[in-house]
Image (tube, rainbow, N blue to C red):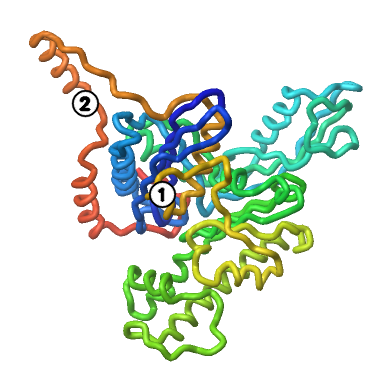
Amino acid sequence: MSKDKYIAAIEISSSKVIGAVGISGKSGQLEIIAAEQEKSTDTVRYGQIQNTEETFNLTNYVLERLERRPNVSPREITGVYIGLSGRSLRSIPIDVSLSLPDDTEISESIVERLRSNALAADIDNSLEIIDAVPRVFKVGKTETHRPIGMMGNSIFATYDLIVARPAIQANLKRVIKDKLGLEIMGIVVTPLATGYVALSEQEKKLGCMLVDLGAETTTVTIYTKGNMVYFATLPLGGRNITRDLTTLNELEEKAEEYKQNFGNAIAPATPSQVKVGRHKQSDISNIVVARSEEIVANIVEQIQYAGLSESDLPEGIVLCGGGARLNGMMELIGKYSGLKVRMAGLPPFIRMNDTMGQGMDSLQVAAIMYAGAEKCDEECLALPVKQEEMPETETAAVVEQAAAVQPKTRKNSFFSSIGNKLSRMFTPIDDDDDGEELN
């Protein structure tokens, strides 16, 4: 980072839309000065936007509140970094190689050729390649993670292609660029950015697993020898537990309240006979425990799917995401895996200076912001341009011209949101497939 600059980021997930504004400094520090969030229900399913208009309203409301903050105003948000996540997001390992003249020094351009070959790989045409993350290189017969500067007559690499359904990016662009009229400064793969800021170098070198347990999806990323070696998204999350609790003939809002206030992922030694509303606490406990154990079993099973064992992860499991905050969840994962478990938090080089943001699950949006700050020096916010006074005849001409252009606006989102919610009462949302693009 070459100078202080304003950064803005948006994370659109199955449970909420969260936005933040921060200032990145020359020393690599990121100070988050404002954070806002709005709860989301059924507008996003498994990380895939299902209703672009409703998502626009929620995101617009978050952005307007950010711009009204005293430490942001009068600046306006003109561009944002956005996070990419979802059920179809996963990795595909691929091997690529190049033959070289004898005693060739490996340069950045040679490594970039390798990466380009990986990005051009032939994969399932229902997926698109988002990124190619290097796992390991081999120059000649020598394995390395830093090939540049080495000498050899061949270079080989294993890349993890990060892939997803095209609709995930397409619908994000519809909301941010087409409807909000904002510049997309960059699209960041949220789980990878989170791993970058939440894990120490020691954890990644010795071996660890990052688990982002969200509302409807859980992302598992495994690191060994300093690099990512496995990446998968499971269609399970905290909302599965909530929906199971609705079988007690409760609305989802009340079921969520029961889960947060009375749920525990670990079964009590003695069933409780205490009544919670109309239900026995033991009935709530049985439902929460059963689904929690299923989620955790699927998480731990990913270690075997990666071709590893628990001994390959001496640094254990690092947890983040709203679903990880369920009482007993951390202990249950430790019990099933036999590994040490800790909760992720903001690293020392990212400071949350907004008291409202301190209660939020802001790790992911902070990671998106930090990745954006590292990638480019462009500002995401701008001061409004002062209009000079013009003669009355010129003013009328300008007004007439502006009316003809009909620029996009981000105002009146509150009333637009109400109208949209009324219309959605009569519009079913199809959640069978996260690959469907919206018109």
Is residue 253 toward the left or the right of residue 151 in the image? left
Residue 136 spot, x, y in % from top left: 77, 41
User: Which circle's residue, 1 or 2, is located before the other in the chain?
Assistant: 1
Seen at 16% across and 12% down, the residue is: 389
Q: Nearer the viewer, mark 1 or mark 2?
A: 1
Quarter of the image with the N terminus in it: top right
Q: How many marks?
A: 2
Residue 7 spot, x, y in % from top left: 45, 33
Q: Is residue 163 visible?
A: no
Q: Residue furthest left?
A: 392
136 over 46 or under it: above or below = above
Viewer-side residue, 257 vs 101: 257
Is residue 391 toward the left or the right of residue 81 in the image? left
Mark 2, residues whose alpha carbon is within 10 Å: few (<14), some, or many (≥20)? few
Seen at 42% across and 55% down, the residue is: 359
Viewer-side residue, 228 vs 226: 226
Q: Which element is circle 2 on?
A: loop
Residue 299 spot, x, y in % from top left: 62, 64
Seen at 20% across and 13% down, the residue is: 388
183 over 64 or under it: above or below = above
Quarter of the image with the C terminus in it: top left
Q: Name the kind of residue labelled 1 in the image.
A: Gly
231 over 333 or under it: above or below = above
On residue 95, the disc is none
Q: Which element is circle 1 on?
A: helix
Seen at 30% across and 36% down, the residue is: 70
Q: Name the kind of residue labelled 2 in the image.
A: Gln
Residue under label 2, please give it: 406
Task: Place residue 118 in its image quadrant.
Answer: top right
Residue under label 1, please give it: 357
